[in-house]
Amino acid sequence: MTETLLELDDIRMNFGAVQALKGISFTVKRGEVIALLGDNGAGKSTLVKIISGGLTQTSGRMTFDGEPYAPRSPSEAKAQGIETVYQDLSLCTNVDVVANFFMGRELTRNFLGLKLLDERAMEEHTARAMREAGTRIPSLRTNVEHLSGGQRQAIELNRFVHWGGKLVLLDEPFAALGVEQTRRGLEMIRRVAAQGIGVIIITHIMQQALEVADRIVVIRQGVVAGDVRARETSADSVIAMITGQSAAEAGQAVDA
């Protein structure tokens, strides 16, 4: 097992005459949190769609878990252990926590020759997984529509980890959350990474990136404009990479 989980090598993406990505290369290690930053239109979402199987790059190669990686669909990416969690999530809001946790993996029991859902076993299984992850939800039988945004994110991340996920892509996960829910979400990301899972998080909030990430990768105009360790950089320096200004100019812009 190598330390590197995902490797991107010269990833390029053309949409007709438009070059969205012009040669993206970086790696993600096991248990590493990468903050992917860049202005609107920089190419972040295109890159995430390529990694998650939603798009196929024009050229370049990817390696995942030591093997060549070329997903033809999001379902193929998911089958290999890569999950994308968007701001609006992918939970079914009209059913409870247990049903969401076991969606597509339901446990059954035999009763008079019939297969019935083993609700008790699934609830115990879900409760144990939530408890081990440090997630508190008053009742696992509550429909998801009645839970907070932070609780919904906790369910989705815990489900991903529990079922053997290896790399999670988080696209603006805290945009609709309050301060306390965001704090808990950042703590959860660190707990996920501590289990050896790679994390790529897209966020526009600089403080979140500096707080949770091990490394910050900045994309500007389709290329990597910076790849730095979070503890060795500053908000001004990262803004300079995003905008193409000097760090001093970026600092003056923030002060203004």
Image: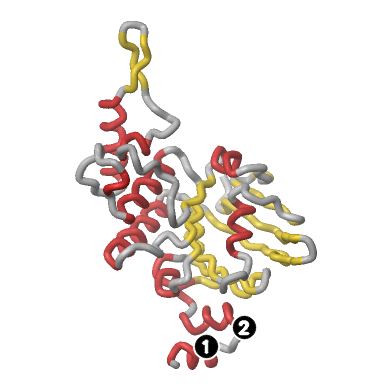
Q: Residue at x 67, y 63 (%)?
A: 25
Q: Dot 1: within a 10 Å radius of its alpha carbon, few (fewer than 14), some, or many (20 or more) residues?
A: many
Position of residue 201 measured from the top left corner of the image (x, y, whole percent): 48, 61
Which quadrant would the N terminus be assigned to in this image?
Answer: top right
Position of residue 106 measured from the top left corner of the image (x, y, whole percent): 39, 27
Q: How many marks?
A: 2
Q: Is residue 227 visible?
A: no
Q: Residue furthest front?
A: 94
> CB of mark 1 within 8 Å of CB of mark 2?
no
Q: Which mark is residue 113?
A: none
Which quadrant would the C terminus be assigned to in this image?
Answer: bottom left
Q: How is the image coloured?
A: secondary structure
Q: Residue at x 31, y 36 (%)?
A: 98
Among the 4 quarters of the image, the one containing residue 28 = bottom right
Q: Residue furthest top?
A: 112
Q: Residue at x 45, y 31 (%)?
A: 104
Q: Is residue 105 visible?
A: yes
Under circle 2, the secondary element is: loop
246 or 90: which is nearer to us? 90
Q: Which mark is residue 250?
A: 1
**Type of amino acid under label 2:** Gly
Position of residue 166 measured from the top left corner of the image (x, y, whole percent): 50, 46
Q: Earlier in the sequence, mark 1 or mark 2?
A: 2
Q: Which mark is residue 244?
A: 2
Q: Residue furthest right?
A: 17
167 or 196: which is nearer to us? 167
Residue 27 to residue 115: above or below: below
Position of residue 144 measured from the top left corner of the image (x, y, whole percent): 31, 44
In the visual, does 236 lie left or right of 102? Answer: right
Residue 36 to residue 109: above or below: below
